[in-house]
Image (tube, helix red, strand yellow):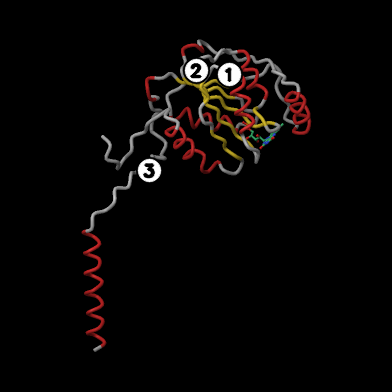
């Protein structure tokens, strides 16, 4: 009797499995690719892309490198005439003053032929709750009228919104797209987020292996 019951149970399981296998499956769109492309890809719409960034301790430079590895672009690091100190307390006191007075530290960086670019990625660390002062210097000495500006930043735990507001106010004739913020402790996911974000804002379209799109 026990053997008969076991046999019946096995037969039922087989029948259920074959039924569900033949049911039509719902179309699930493939998720956007998150793998780094082998080569940087052409930006969509035949645009020319520049990545400009300031970085003091290298975090923002890392993120700028991820963007540069993904989309064909030129890369420029903003350098200040007076190098910022490595002593945190001294630097913090100085930056508090610079931010409070809207100071623009002079830059040594010269950008060749800025007018030829359509999209400008602008990267910086959050310093004292806003974009590091070299960002203000860059935006007040370069005319970005008609260009698309894309902020990206690295930070501790602060929010990036104040820095986005600053950028929008300093280039009112530009289209400022949704930025990305990489917080301390989230670098293991940063590349995947960067790739998803670049596709979301429409700067690149990566080939989606496994999707039906040709
Ligand atoms: C002077 C100073 C001020 C900072 N202020 C903030 C802040 O207000 N909020 C925050 O989240 N992180 C703050 N940070 C942390 C930096 O944003 C973070 O370490 C960033 O990733 C550094 O980027 P970098 O390596 O490209 O210079 C501050 C760091 C420094 C040195």
- State the image coordinates of residue 135 (x, y, percent, origin top left): 63, 22
Circle number at residue 31 = 3
Q: Secondary structure at mark 3?
A: loop
Give whichever of 67, 164 is nearer the camera: 164
Q: Looking at the rendering, which quadrant does residue 8 occupy? A: bottom left
Give whichever of 127, 100 is nearer the camera: 100
Q: Earlier in the sequence, mark 1 or mark 3?
A: 3
The CA distance from mark 1 to mark 3 is: 34 Å
- State the image coordinates of residue 197 (x, y, percent, origin top left): 47, 35
Q: Which residue is mark 1?
A: 171
The CA distance from mark 2 to mark 3 is: 30 Å
Residue positioned 66% across, 18% down in the render: 80
Crowding near the residue tagged with mark 2, few <14, some 14–19, many ≥20 C-alpha atoms within 10 Å: some
Q: Which residue is mark 2?
A: 147
Q: Quadrant of ligand 1?
A: top right
Q: Earlier in the sequence, mark 1 or mark 2?
A: 2
Ligand 1 has an atom within 8 Å of the beta carbon of the residue at disc 3: no
Q: Residue furthest bottom?
A: 1
- Going by the image, does 12 lie left or right of 47? left
């Amino acid at each position: 009797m026990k053997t008969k019951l076991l046999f019946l149970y096995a037969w039922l399981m087989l029948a259920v499995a074959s039924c569900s296998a033949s049911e039509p499956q719902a179309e699930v769109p493939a998720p956007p690719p998150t793998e780094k492309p082998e080569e940087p890809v052409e930006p969509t719409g035949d645009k020319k892309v520049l990545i400009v960034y300031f970085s003091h301790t290298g975090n923002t430079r890392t993120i700028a490198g991820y963007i540069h590895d993904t989309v064909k672009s030129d890369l420029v690091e903003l350098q200040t005439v007076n190098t910022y100190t490595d002593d945190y307390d001294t630097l913090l006191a100085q930056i508090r003053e610079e931010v409070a007075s809207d100071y623009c530290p002079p830059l040594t960086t010269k950008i060749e032929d800025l007018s030829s670019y359509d999209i400008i990625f602008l990267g910086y660390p959050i310093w004292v709750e806003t974009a590091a002062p070299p960002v203000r210097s860059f935006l007040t000495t370069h005319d970005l009228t008609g260009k698309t500006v894309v902020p990206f930043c690295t930070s501790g735990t602060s929010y990036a919104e104040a820095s986005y507001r600053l950028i929008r106010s300093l280039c009112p004739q530009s289209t400022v797209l949704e930025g990305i913020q990489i917080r301390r402790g989230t670098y293991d996911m940063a590349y995947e987020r960067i790739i998803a974000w670049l596709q979301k804002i429409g700067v690149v379209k990566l080939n989606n292996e496994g999707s039906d799109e040709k």
